Image (cartoon, grey):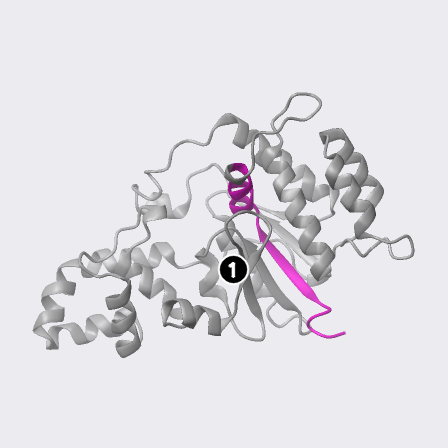
Amino acid sequence: MSKEDKKLFLIDANSLIHRAFHALPPLTSPSGAPVGALYGVASILLKLWREDAPRYAAACFDRPEPTFRKEKYAAYKAQRAKAPDELVAQIIETHKLFEVFHIPIFEAPGWEADDLIAALAHRFRNAAGAHTVILTGDLDTLQLVEDGRTIVRALKTGLSDTVRYDEAAVRARYGLTPRQLPDYKALVGDASDNVKGVPGIGPKTAAALLQKFGTLEELYAAAPEDGRLAKKLLPFRADAALAKELVTLRDDAPVSAGAIEELAVSADMARARSYFESQGFRALVKRLDEAAPQNDPARLL
């Protein structure tokens, strides 16, 4: 069995739900519950599973409790508005969607979904040649890309297509390697998480500095010898170090899976059909029929 046959999909569940919530019009189930985001995530799963047929998968969720990043930096994500009730309800219901597809769920108080993804990718990076695909709605996990082991597929605008990021694609976008992206964000900041960078350092300057010096630490080691760099960088050394710590994903997050076989996906089309019908997803029921011919009921997954 080749790596292409042994794909491990690690799903950034919250990012997909948020993207679907904002991309689709409001929909309701026969019982009147909001299901637009749920429908969008189900549609994404059907499309990607039909095209890629992963052998293994895991869905990683954020938790509502404060994370270790919030405890270290009170302003972390402080600018974000509280999620509306109709979105929260669908985040909860999406757990059931993954259960219908027999996709193991991982979440841990104090940790973000991206950390759990990092931990799973690290744990199974040498698992009998399995090839990891991270499915996400943002670019935060690009730092995990590793040729021959891990790629990222990030949703484009909308929900239909994804952009595939290997190391070459990361370099083409940023001019840097995946491992340099935390250093990059430490310099330019990450507005989506309310992480401040170094004032006056934009994307082009940050990329050029890291191309020359390699890492944030090496850059700061050289700064005292360059008056211009020293003036721009040294007053914000502690801020930049904190920013790098905040944006670096932790691969020591607690995940219970000890063997990749625990993440094996098994198709249950009858259960999926029943669930879709209960939610009023008639178009997805039709796609279920089209996705799996009678002589290959597991083709969907």
Q: What is the crowding at mark 1: few (fewer than 14 residues within 10 Å), some, or many (at least 20)? A: many
Q: At 44% from the left edge and 68% from the top edge, which residue is drawn?
A: 170
Taking 256 as reference, is 87 above or below it? Answer: above
Stretch of the chain drawn in magenta: 1-21
Is there any visible trace of residue 262 in the rendered image? no
Q: Which residue is mark 1?
A: 118
Taking 243 as reference, is 77 above or below it? Answer: above
Q: At 72% from the left edge and 75% from the top edge, which residue is drawn?
A: 2
Q: Between residue 106 and residue 135, name the one nearer to us.
A: 135
Q: Position of residue 115 (x, y in %)?
A: 49, 54
Q: Between residue 227 and residue 201, name the one nearer to us.
A: 201
Q: Please name the amino acid that badge 1 sits on.
A: Ala
Q: At 26% from the left edge and 73% from the top edge, which residue is drawn?
A: 208
Q: Between residue 275 and residue 66, name the one nearer to us.
A: 275
Magenta-span inclusion, residue 9: yes
Is there any visible trace of residue 167 in the rendered image? yes
Q: Position of residue 145 (x, y in %)?
A: 50, 67
